[in-house]
Amino acid sequence: MKGFVIKSFLIFLAIMLGYRMRYRLMNNALGNPLIRRFLVGSAMSFPGLRSKMMDEII
């Protein structure tokens, strides 16, 4: 029971810190060319997102 409470608290803390530092984490991830290429490629696989981005560019 004690281990479950500690694990739950640590997971909650990690989620909270990740949310508070989301822009810093995103900048670090997008600063790496391999990760950026993977994330952009993944985002472009969604048809609705891809069409919205292409409409804004053109």
Image (spheres, grey):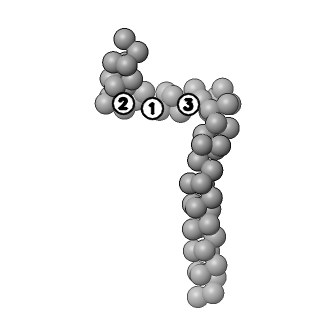
Question: Between 56 and 47, which is closer to the camera in this rendering?
Answer: 56
Mark 2 lies on a secondary structure that is: helix
Q: Is residue 38 above or below residue 5?
A: above
Mark 2 residue crowding within 10 angstroms, few (<14) / some (14–19) / many (20+): few
Q: Position of residue 34 (x, y in %)?
A: 64, 28
Taking 49 as reference, is 13 left or right? right
Mark 1 residue crowding within 10 angstroms, few (<14) / some (14–19) / many (20+): few
Residue at numbered disc 2: 49
Taking 11 as reference, is 45 left or right? left
- Image point (31%, 30%), residue name: 48
Identity of the amino acid at label 1?
Ala
- Give the alpha-carbon distance from disc 1 to disc 2, as whole Å: 7 Å
Mark 3 lies on a secondary structure that is: helix
Q: Are marks 3 and 2 in contact (CB under 8 Å)?
A: no
Quadrant position of residue 30: top right
Q: Is residue 34 above or below residue 55?
A: below
Question: Between 23 and 54, which is closer to the camera in this rendering?
Answer: 23
Q: Is residue 13 above or below residue 40?
A: below
Taking 36 as reference, is 41 left or right? left
Question: Between 9 and 47, which is closer to the camera in this rendering?
Answer: 9
Mark 1 lies on a secondary structure that is: helix
Q: Earlier in the sequence, mark 1 or mark 2?
A: 1
Q: Which mark is residue 38?
A: 3
- Image point (64%, 78%), residue name: 6
Q: Position of residue 5 (x, y in %)?
A: 59, 81
Residue at numbered disc 1: 43
